[in-house]
Every structure is written in C-alpha cells, then in structure tokens.
Image (tube, helix red, strand yellow):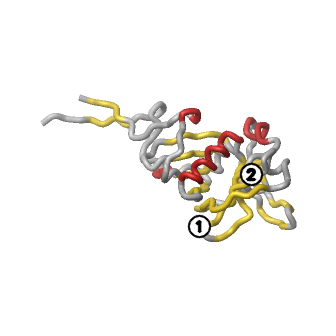
C-alpha cells in the first residue's frame, strides 16, 4: 500500500497564528519571507530587500544588499521619517547574531505596496520591507516570544530549514509494506 504523507503544511497568511518559537526566514534571492513554526508548518509572502549596489545614505557609503546572517529583533522603535518607515514609523531593529546592534531592521515603507507588487523588489537601503499586515504579525510574534524574534537572511532557500515541504505543491510518498 502507498500513502501520501505531508511532512509540513503551508498555511495561507490569513490563517496564520503566531506561536512561541516561530522564526522569520528571508530569502533575498527571490525576495520572499517565511514565518515558520517549530513543527515546520509555514506561511510565505513577498517582501523587498536591499538594492544590489553601493549607496550613500544616512552619512554612510556601503553596499545596500541585505546582508546574509542570523539576527534577533530585540527592540522596536518609532522613526520620524514616514516615507522610509511608513505611516506609523515602526522599526524592528536587527541585532547580528543576537548581540551586535545594526542599522538594519524590518519596517514598512510609504510606497511599500508598490514595491511589493513589483517584479523588481531590490529597493531598500538594506532593510527588509514588508506590508503593514506582515509587520503587525511580526510584532505579535516578537511579543509572544518574550520580546525577541529570530531572523535568518539567506541568498537562496535552505531546503533543510523546513521540517517538511509544502503540502499542496510537494508531497512525500511514504511506502508502507506489510510483513
């Protein structure tokens, strides 16, 4: 007998509920975000990341590509620039390896909806740009997890990150044989 057993489930974002232990995975190659439960269940959504060029911004000259690494959101700030940070100015600060303060963060943008609808989503100065709805969910996840959110940025998807694959698109066939 052959049965098809999904090893994880992809959830629609509208059905997603944050849980303790969730992580936020960002694939900068395709500009897609994944919220992942410890069980491997996940949801995904478009986002924008850093331009792939050198820029001069806030008194710094640097490569604006969103850096690859492991991060922790350890603080939330309100920024005054409502174009760069969206109407509410909410900014989730990223700390490299959970320790080192950085200029990078996660936030909305006044023109974020246009950015997210575009095929060209390398638009930020290095930060991760998300919709208001996604930002609200990330903030709820941060609060649920003791005011911390684990974040991984990668160029390309690490297939081993998921305990499983998308139930709707890829199912793993498990063959059970009787003795």
Place residue 132 in its image quadrant.
top right
Camera-side mark, 2 or 1 = 2
The circle on residue 97 is 1
| Residue in view at x 58 percent, y 62 percent | 70
Give the residue displayed 64% in from the left and 49% down from the top: 29
Indicate the position of residue 127 as horizontal and vertical percent values: 73, 55
Q: Secondary structure at mark 1?
A: loop
Q: Is residue 47 left or right of residue 178?
A: right
- Image coordinates of residue 137 in percent, x first then y, are 62, 44
**Quadrant housing residue 110:** top right
Q: Mark 2 and mark 1: span between their CA atoms?
A: 22 Å
Q: Position of residue 81 (x, y in %)?
A: 85, 53
Q: Secondary structure at mark 2?
A: strand
Give 51 or 86, whichever is nearer the viewer: 86
Mark 2 residue crowding within 10 angstroms, few (<14) / some (14–19) / many (20+): many
**Residue that label 2 marks:** 90
Which residue appears at 68% of the width and 68% of the height?
A: 101
Up the image or down, 64 lies above or below 41; here it is below
Compared across the picture, whether 12 is left or right of 47 comes to: left
Q: Quadrant of the N terminus?
A: top left
Q: Earlier in the sequence, mark 2 or mark 1?
A: 2
x and y percentages locating residue 57 in the rendered image: 85, 61
């Amino acid at each position: 007998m052959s049965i098809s057993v999904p090893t994880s489930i992809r959830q629609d974002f509208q059905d997603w509920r944050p849980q303790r232990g969730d992580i936020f995975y960002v694939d900068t190659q395709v500009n897609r975000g994944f919220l992942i439960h410890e069980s491997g269940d996940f949801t995904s959504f478009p986002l924008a990341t850093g331009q792939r060029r050198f820029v001069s911004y806030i008194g710094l000259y640097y490569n604006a590509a969103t850096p690859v690494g492991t991060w922790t959101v350890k603080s939330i700030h309100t920024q005054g620039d409502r174009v760069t940070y969206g109407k509410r100015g909410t900014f989730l600060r990223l700390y490299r390896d959970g320790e080192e303060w950085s200029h990078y963060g996660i936030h909305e943008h006044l023109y974020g909806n246009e950015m997210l609808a575009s095929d060209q989503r390398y638009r930020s100065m290095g930060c991760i740009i998300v919709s208001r709805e996604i930002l609200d969910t990330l903030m709820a996840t941060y609060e649920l997890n003791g005011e911390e959110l684990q974040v991984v940025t990668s160029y390309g998807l690490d297939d081993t990150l998921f305990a499983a694959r998308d139930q709707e698109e890829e199912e793993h066939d498990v063959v059970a044989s009787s003795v």
